[in-house]
Structure formats: C-alpha cells, structure tokens
C-alpha cells in the first residue's frame, strides 16, 4: 500500500504552529512539514504489510500522526479473539519512521500502532507547560486521548528512551490498559547523583571509596549556556547548515539504515522532524535536568505499577543508558513479573542496531501475552 496515498493532505502553513519565535525566519531553515511528509513517505515505502497512515484528532483538536499495520496474508477464523495490539512510542527527537526496521516483523501476527508523540514529528505542536509534572501530564493525557480515539481497550505498550519514561507514567495512571510494559533503553529512571557523591571501585575487602571529581569549569560553563535553550535549538539556528550538522554529528543514523537507503534519507528525516517549531522539546526540557537527568526520576515511582503487570526492560550493551537501573527496578518490584534483558552489540537505538534480535525478543514477549 502506498503510504502517501493513505496520508491526510497537509499544507505547510496550516501545519506551522503559531506563535513560534522562528516564524519570522521561514526561509532560513530548509525545512517544512511537506518536506517531512515526503521524506517519511519514502521511508514507509519499505513496508510490506498493510499500512494505514492518518491523523487521529483528539477532543482538544490536537492531531496525532498514527500508523496502523496489519498482516493481510493471515486469515483468522471469525470466532478467534483478536490479539492484543502492540503500541510503539518513540524517543526524544524521533518519529514513526525510525521503526522502519521493526514494523513489518512485529505486525506479522498482531496489529501494530506507532504514533508521533505530541510535539514531535508530524503531530500537533502545542504549547507545553514549563512545570515538569504538568508537562509530563500533557504527554500522558495525549496518549490516553489517542487510545480512546483509536478505540483500543488494552495494549502491549513499548517505549524507547523518552517514550519509555512516558509509557511508564501512562501505565502507572492507566494500568488496566497495559497488559505488558516493554521499556527499551528508557530515559529518566535513575536518581541524579549528588555533587561529591562517593563511588566504590572494587568489591569486598579492600574496597576503596573515592569521591568523583567535579567537572571542570569549562564544562560547567557550557552546560549553563546550553541549559538556556531548547535541546535542538542549534539545528534550527544553523539555518541552511542544519542538515549538514545532523549528518556530521549523527552519521550513525545513516549507517544504521544504509542497506535500506544509500543516501541521506534517514538523516534528512531526523533533520525535518526537529527543525520545525519546538514544542515537545519544551516539554522535555521542563522535565529534564542538565545533562539529561529527569527532574522526577521514574525509579522513585515505579513501585506504583501494579505488582501483577509484566515489565520487560531491554538495554543495549553499548548504550550510554546504565542497565543497572533496570536491575534496581526489578529489586523494587521484588523481581516479580520483571525481566531485564541485554542485547549485544547494540547502542541506545537498540531497535536499529540489532533489529533482528530486537524483533525476535519483542515478538516472543507479545506471543506470551497473546
């Protein structure tokens, strides 16, 4: 199915969020929602299963860009109960196109839904609160309104990075809707280390307790300056050099998908997703501390998940996200219905680094749910 044919027509001006500080400089950045749409459409041509791509309009008129995939080759008896759908939530600065290595495999035996978080990708970009709890609630409330609008009773909920943080918050508030929670390299779980906190090196007798040295002054200065802006402001400020910056600083995205695209399709997609008016970034910035820690660490709230809710945490062995937090979560939940898994040779973007192993693990989890 041609993804372009299933997309709701959209015009650049109607999709541009009003009131942005960037509106006065429209020609400076070589981007538009139409360019994002066409780049995404190129990515989605790789999909083999049935694809329905559309905007889901929420009661408050915000729109969530949504993909639904089903496998038309499998004909089930009419009396067979439908399988629990898998819902996938991307991370910070991402969009549905980044799941291109996973969507077909995961939708082989059950419906799969993937959507752009509010404030990211092709979804609406409303104003977010600068209060961390309220910003988080805006994200979570939009997911629940989306679920109601789509008509899902329950789901297997999978979230990557920021998506994992928000998926956990959603599962805490709406546990009856989540049959299994899958967190992939989730952001925002650990407590932020306190200045001068002691770290231990070695084990057993003779263990040395050392104070972690404070960062140099120049590091503190850079962090202080960067904290004044939205995380991806540099991409927009760079104007026509923005795409080049993405290519230079994130060449890994091109490598991860080079067997699908021999050009800059994926880095262009990342650029167009994040060169639009910032919105979700504002929400993320409200929820985060400098250097990426969460102001409201999820490890302090994970005990609110029902003890009976199955939870699987997937980490890449080469990721910057510390998998030890996953084991701490298992301890908090008394290790009941909680599993921590590592995927070898994978960095933070586990699903793209080792898609075969990632898909296999997620399919097995889903099959256990039915």
Image: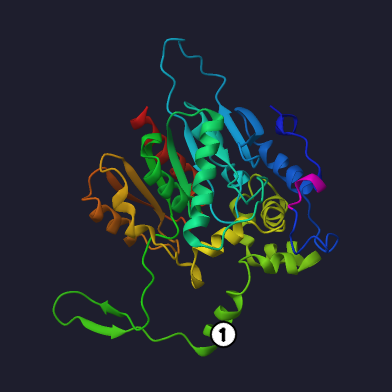
Give left or right: position of 237 versus 258. right
Q: Is residue 302 left or right of residue 21?
A: left
> Which quadrant, please, contains the N terminus?
top right
Above/below status of 61 relative to 2: below
Q: Which quadrant of the structure image shows residue 96?
A: top right
Residue 145 seen from this side: yes
Judging depth in this view, the residue of 57 and 302 nearest the camera is: 57
The residue pinned by badge 1 equals 221
Q: Position of residue 25 (x, y in %)?
A: 83, 64
Residue 193 in picture, x, y percent from top left: 36, 74
**Is residue 203 rendered to the left or right of residue 370?**
left
For the stretch drawn in magenta, what is the main secondary structure? helix
Residue 212 is situated, as x and y percent measured from the top left of the image, at 35, 83
Q: Residue furthest top?
A: 78
Q: Is residue 285 magenta?
A: no
Q: Is residue 364 visible?
A: no
Q: Which residues are magenta?
A: 13-17
Identify the secondary structure beneath mark 1: helix
The number of discs equals 1
Which residue is found at the position 68% from the left and 63% from the top? 246
């Amino acid at each position: 199915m041609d993804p372009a044919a299933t997309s709701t027509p959209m015009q650049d001006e109607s999709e541009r969020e009003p009131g942005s500080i960037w509106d006065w400089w429209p020609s400076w950045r070589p981007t538009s929602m139409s360019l994002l749409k066409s780049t995404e459409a190129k990515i989605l041509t790789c999909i083999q299963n049935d694809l329905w791509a559309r905007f889901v309009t929420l009661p408050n008129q915000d729109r969530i860009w949504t993909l639904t995939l089903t496998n038309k080759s499998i004909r089930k008896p009419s009396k067979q109960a439908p399988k629990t759908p898998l819902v996938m939530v991307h991370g910070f600065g991402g969009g549905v196109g980044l799941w291109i290595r996973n969507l077909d495999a995961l939708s082989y035996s059950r419906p799969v839904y993937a959507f752009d978080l509010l404030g990211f990708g092709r979804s609406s970009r409303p104003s977010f609160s600068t209060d961390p709890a309220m910003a988080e609630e805006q994200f979570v409330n939009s997911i629940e309104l989306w679920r109601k609008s789509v008509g899902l009773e329950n789901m297997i909920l999978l979230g990557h990075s920021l998506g994992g943080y928000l998926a956990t918050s959603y599962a805490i508030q709406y546990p009856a809707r989540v049959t299994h929670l899958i967190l992939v390299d989730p952001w925002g779980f650990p407590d932020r280390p306190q200045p001068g906190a002691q770290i231990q090196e070695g084990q057993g007798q003779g263990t040395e307790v050392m104070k972690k040295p404070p960062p140099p002054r120049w590091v503190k200065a850079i962090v202080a300056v960067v904290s004044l802006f939205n995380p991806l402001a540099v991409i927009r400020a760079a104007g026509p050099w923005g795409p080049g910056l993405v290519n230079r600083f994130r060449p890994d995205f091109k490598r991860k998908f080079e067997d699908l695209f021999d050009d800059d399709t994926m880095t262009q997609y990342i650029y167009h997703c994040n060169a639009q008016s910032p919105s979700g970034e504002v929400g993320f910035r409200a929820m985060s501390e400098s250097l990426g820690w969460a102001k409201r660490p999820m490890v302090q709230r994970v005990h609110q998940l029902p003890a009976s809710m199955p939870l699987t945490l997937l980490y890449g062995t080469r990721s910057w996200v510390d998998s030890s937090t996953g084991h701490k979560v298992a301890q908090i939940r008394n290790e009941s219905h909680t599993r921590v898994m590592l995927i070898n040779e994978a960095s933070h973007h586990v699903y793209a680094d080792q898609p075969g192993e990632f898909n296999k693990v997620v399919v097995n989890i889903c099959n256990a749910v039915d």
